[in-house]
Amino acid sequence: MARIARVDGQKVTLETGATAGLRPGDELNVYRSQRYFDALDGTPELADAGVSITLDNVHPDFSTGRLGTSSGQVNIQRDDVAIIW
């Protein structure tokens, strides 16, 4: 699981890299992080964004990849989560 640090069009930067086992060419599914404060604990929930990221460059502490569609079309933002299954 990796948190999205930056989004610029189709380019995405993740806060996780090779030290977490990520490799170039890995495909991660994107999930929207939502938090509802109607209860005292306010636990986060993940909703499938229906888009994936393919990694291009992987460094020890961060990685970059590309979305299949523009981030504005599916509203991918910083702090959303990318998960490899």
Image: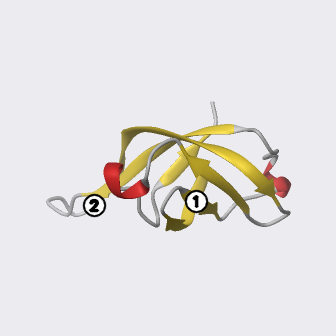
Residue type indicated by callout 2: Gly
Above or below, 58 relative to 46: below
Q: Is residue 43 visible?
A: no
Find the distance from the CA under tag 1 to the CA under tag 2.
31 Å
Secondary structure under the numbered disc 2 in the rendered image: loop
Label 1 Cα neighbours within 10 Å, binned few <14 / some 14-19 / many ≥20 = some
At x 33% / y 51%, what residue is drawn?
Answer: 73
Of residue 42 and residue 79, the one placed in the foreground of this image is 79
Please provide percent x and percent y for residue 27: 65, 37
Foreground mark, 1 or 2?
A: 1
Q: Residues within 10 Å of mark 2 (few under 14, many from 20)?
A: few
| Mark positioned earlier in the residue sequence (1 or 2) | 1
Instruction: Report x, y in % for residue 10.
Output: 52, 55
Residue 74 horizontal side relative to residue 23, left or right: left
Q: Quadrant of the C terminus?
A: top right
Taking the image as drawn, is residue 79 in sight?
Answer: yes
Q: In the image, what residue type sits under mark 1?
A: Lys
Instruction: Report x, y in % for residue 65.
Output: 66, 53
Disc 1: which residue? 11
Q: Which mark is residue 42?
A: 2
